[in-house]
Image (cartoon, grey):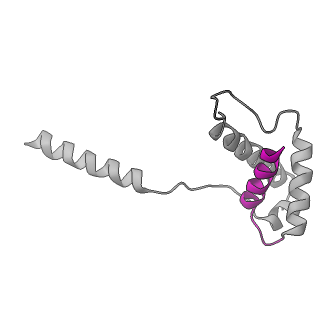
Amino acid sequence: MKTKITALLLCFLCQIAYAQSPDVRGAPDCSRWLQPENATRELMNKSWLVGYLSGLNMGFALDLRRKPFNYFEGVIPGQIYLWMDNYCRANPLASVIAGSGALYEEMAKK
């Protein structure tokens, strides 16, 4: 009986974990992107952006023919940072997540 109760409890806990939405942590907003508090924060912002875009790229890493592709092939980090600088200047109340999505969509069109 104890085993059955434990199994039911574990099933219940698994459903709770499954129902949670993803949480993006560490994402700066555009005001923090353009004016980081210090050099460490700037490095953290840039590292976060490259990591987030890498994750997006891996998440959509296969086209319809199941061949790998890379939207950012040949793009250096400095180009990404410049693009985000321009995006944040044009959209100061936006988040870097929104900017990342816009950049990813732009790269997907090429």
x then y, percent, for residue 64: 63, 34
Instruction: Kindly tell me whether residue 17 is visible in this rendering.
Output: yes
Q: Relative to the observer, which residue lies in front, 98 or 8? A: 98
Q: Is residue 65 left or right of residue 88?
A: left
The image quarter containing residue 27 is bottom right
Q: State the residue at coordinates (14%, 39%).
A: 3
x then y, percent, for residue 56: 68, 44
Q: State the residue at coordinates (87%, 47%).
A: 80
x then y, percent, for residue 63: 66, 35
Q: State the residue at coordinates (89%, 38%).
A: 76
Residue 97 shown in magenta: yes
In what quadrant of the picture does the C terminus appear? top right
Q: Is residue 79 left or right of residue 64?
A: right
Q: Residue furthest top?
A: 67
Q: Is residue 49 left or right of residue 22?
A: right
Relative vertical location of residue 55 with respect to residue 16 in this rendering, above or below: above
Magenta span: predominant SS is: helix
Q: Relative to the observer, which residue lies in front, 73 or 18? A: 73
Q: State the residue at coordinates (81%, 48%).
A: 46
The image quarter containing residue 91 is bottom right
Relative vertical location of residue 77 with respect to residue 69 in this rendering, above or below: below
Relative vertical location of residue 29 with respect to residue 53 in this rendering, above or below: below
Magenta range is 92-110
Q: Is residue 73 left or right of residue 1?
A: right
Residue 28 shown in magenta: no
Q: Relative to the observer, which residue lies in front, 91 or 108? A: 108
Total labels: the figure holds: 0
In what quadrant of the picture does the N terminus appear? top left
x then y, percent, for residue 68: 69, 28
